[in-house]
Image (cartoon, rainbow, N blue to C red):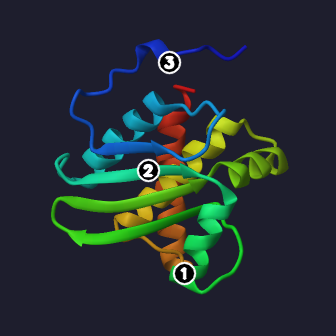
Amino acid sequence: MKKKLRSSIRVPSATPLRVFHCSRGVTIPEPVIQECACNIYKKERIRLTQAASLVFCSDFIIRSLNRRYRKIDRATDVLSFSIGDPDLLGEIYISVARAAVQARRFGSPFDEEILRLFIHGLHHLLGYDHENRADREIMEEKERRRLAESIVFL
């Protein structure tokens, strides 16, 4: 039996993450995501004053963004946009519908898939990428570690 530890999460009053919902009717594990963000910021030595935005959106919105900025006309699970501002790390968009489909496909809980996508998007904002094998291995190892550290709170 899996223990529920949500009540033990202590999110700092000044968190680096601003969360927005364009999708209704879905419960998102925001305290866990905030705690995860603070953990990643600390381990990567990112100032908490350098905020990031996280937007939970529809397939329609993410497809529009993907088409406009990446010239790929289809929905995707997560997109990250660096802003190039010293006070703003960037924006992460997660398709709630894609996350639900992937959670079913991978046989994982929805909250875990949301957390995995957030971690992936945040690592892109921090400059990690998966364009070649060596970079992909570095990024995936960091993501696995951060997910393992955060998943106990789901």
Amino acid type at circle 2 is Leu
Amino acid type at circle 1 is Arg
Residue at image mark 1: 68
| Crowd band around label 2 with a 10 angstrom C-alpha radius: few (<14), some (14–19), many (20+) | many
Q: Earlier in the sequence, mark 2 or mark 3?
A: 3
Q: CA distance from mark 2 to mark 1?
A: 19 Å
Residue at image mark 2: 54
Note whether 48 is above or below 109 in the view shown. Answer: below
Report x, y in % for residue 46.
22, 54
Q: Taking the image as drawn, is residue 130 in sight?
A: yes
Q: Nearer the viewer, residue 61 or 40?
A: 61
- Contact (CB < 8 A) between labels 2 and 3? no
Note whether 64 is above or below 38 in the view shown. Answer: below
Q: Earlier in the sequence, mark 3 or mark 1?
A: 3
| Crowd band around label 1 with a 10 angstrom C-alpha radius: few (<14), some (14–19), many (20+) | few
Amino acid type at circle 3 is Arg
Q: Nearer the viewer, mark 3 or mark 1?
A: 1
